Image (tube, rainbow, N blue to C red):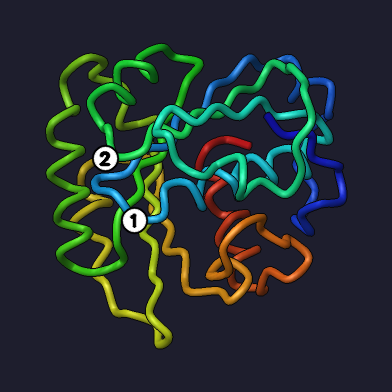
Amino acid sequence: MSDIPPTSAPLPPMPGSRRAALQRARTVIVTGVAGGTGTTTVAALLADAIGGRLGVVVQATDHSGGELAARLPSLEPATTRLTLHDMGAHVGPAAALAATPENCLVVVGRATDDGAADVRAALASIAHEPDPTLLGRSVVALVDRAAKPTAVDTRVVRDAGVAGVVVLRADRALSRPGRIEVAGLGRATIRTVSELLAALGW
């Protein structure tokens, strides 16, 4: 679980009142189409950014036996109305957990054409069950770890009917093991995380 101070992520202010945002019970489920795609990194960035933008505590749970706790900027016992789950490479169970109107899903894949195709196949597998409206509450994050940006056609994923698609480019602050130093994140990463939050309705 992570207690994130409001200034931890230099993101634009969220429109609307903080009180109204706090009143929205919400669960964000992050899952990947395969191991090693960057699911835990995306989950940690989201936990930090949501806490930083709203000024609230995010309860983060790692279901994959991964390193979410080690990646989070800070750790404190806390509870809140917002919960984030790192499901690892388990799209089916993640979709089942997200199958209520208050919840949303983030699907993580590699930022390559093959990676986008893998994400499209995963989305097709959950398009009708357990919740036919889930894709409209889902956002895709394609993670690029190459030193030079990889060209990827995101239309194959956008055409699936998701709420948004973002591409998270390589960032030295993310490549280091252990806790993410958010103060060292590049502008492109900050912009991408902000786009991800906007697509999720935050």
| Disc 2: CA contacts within 10 A as few (<14), some (14-19) or many (>=20) | some
Asked where in the image residue 26 lies, by quadrant, the reply is: top right
Q: Given the current orientation, which residue lies at the most extreme bottom position?
A: 148
Asked where in the image residue 48 lies, by quadrant, the reply is: top right
Q: Residue at x 21, y 43 (%)?
A: 160
Indicate the amino acid at tag 2: Gly
Specify which label sits upstream in the sequence, 1 or 2: 1
Looking at the rendered structure, which numbered label has been put on residue 161?
Answer: 2
In the image, is residue 148 above or below residue 97? Answer: below
Mark 1 or mark 2: which is in front? Answer: 1
Whole-percent x and y of residue 157? 24, 52
Indicate the amino acid at tag 1: Thr
Whole-percent x and y of residue 104? 45, 27
Whole-percent x and y of residue 74? 76, 43
Looking at the image, how many numbered discs can be counted on the residues? 2
Drawn side of residue 173 relative to residue 43, left or right: right
Drawn side of residue 181 relative to residue 156, left or right: right
Closer-to-camera residue (66/80): 66
| Disc 1: CA contacts within 10 A as few (<14), some (14-19) or many (>=20) | many
Dot 1: element: loop
Q: Quadrant of the N terminus?
A: top right
Q: Residue at x 22, y 58 (%)?
A: 116
Closer-to-camera residue (199/106): 106
Disc 1/disc 2 C-alpha distance (Å): 22 Å
Dot 2: element: loop
Closer-to-camera residue (102/62): 62
Q: Are marks 1 and 2 in contact (CB under 8 Å)?
A: no
Whole-percent x and y of residue 32? 32, 44
Drawn side of residue 62 relative to residue 143, left or right: right
Q: Which residue is mark 1?
A: 37
Q: Residue at x 27, y 51 (%)?
A: 158
